[in-house]
Amino acid sequence: MENYTYNSPMLQLEGLKVADYSVRLVFFMFLFSYIIFMIMNLGILIIIVFEKNLHQPMYVLFGNLTVSDIIGSTHILPRLLSDILLPPSERLISYYECVVQAFTTHMFGTTSHTVLMVMAFDRYIAICRPLSYSTIMTNRMIVKLIALSWGVPFVLVGILLGLTVRLNRCRTLIANPFCDNASLFKLSCESVIINNIYGLTFTVLLYVASIGCIILTYGSITAVCLATKNKSLNSKAFKTCSTHLVVYLIMSLSGITIVVLHRFPQYSDYRKLSAILFVIVPGSLNPIIYGIQSKEIQNFLYKLFISRKYTFHQAHISVLNNI
């Protein structure tokens, strides 16, 4: 007969199954990835904050996506790095800390969708209704859109975790590298049919809304570009929209992979790796993709590089003159 521990205040994270001889290699790979991730995202965020030319709706919204990526990685990767160095029996986490981590995990994933939906709306107004852009995308409208893109996920994820917290627990092992809703409600021996129904409905509605928004906005943009036959407009639309679409596809495919693999316990190792890559890969590619496409960001970096090079050159001349 299986022994149960009811409502234990401490849980055990299964974590990644790493061979002893490769622990250090995996640790330093993830550490290096996290450092590069933070440098790129914090760098982009600082540029958006301090460069006045980037105080435009598109970049303000992209800044919110960057903040979401930073939160998503910071609440998972440092803990994951410390757990890699511990034996499985010592990878412990309190239940309430696990709930907070699960909330942040789903908040990060949902906000990525809602922010990208708002960014798609911004591109639609900019390209399809350029004369009305400044009157529609006012500072007040931007604040409302940002509040909506964070507020809706907060409510939906709050309900998601609220349904899970109400359950009594009879297990203590989180079969994941970090806490999420599915891992938490699997700790219960009660019926979780309500959790499954709400979770599935939540996921389906989120993807239907985001995919529908992308199809409608970019379908309209494509129709406008084909109708006007303006090469300059078409080129600008292609650059901005292709960037957005690439970011959306990477994020969506990563998320769908995790959802699908959750239904197949035999592929748990692949699911764990996919969950970690979902945190690292899209957030690492976003600054690169937008940095390559954005002339404003390129100009800022160019000016920064030239000014530092000039300052270094002047200092070098000054030193030589003093010798």
Image (cartoon, rainbow, N blue to C red):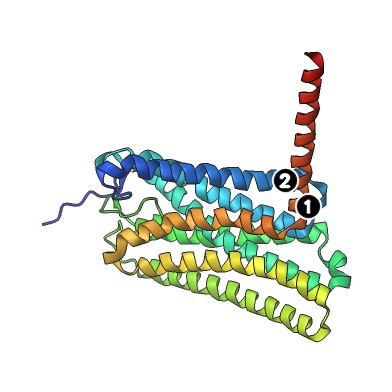
Q: Pick out the residue farthest to the bottom.
A: 227
Q: Pick out the residue farthest to the top.
A: 323
Q: Residues within 10 Å of mark 2 (few under 14, many from 20)?
A: some
**Would residue 130 appear left or right of 17 to someone viewing this image?**
right
**Residues under labels 2 and 1: Cα distance?**
8 Å
Q: Which residue is mark 1?
A: 54
First-in-chain label (2 vs 1): 2
Instruction: Identify which residue is drawn at 65% across, 66% down.
Output: 244
**Would residue 60 appear left or right of 155 to someone viewing this image?**
right
Quadrant in which the C terminus is drawn = top right
Q: Which residue is mark 2?
A: 47
Instruction: Identify which residue is drawn at 74% across, 78% down.
Output: 221
Helix, strand or loop for disc 2: helix
Amino acid type at circle 2 is Ile
Instruction: Identify which residue is drawn at 52% across, 68% down.
Output: 252
Q: Are the residues tagged 2 and 1 within 8 Å (C-beta)?
A: yes
Q: Nearer the viewer, residue 244 or 145?
A: 244
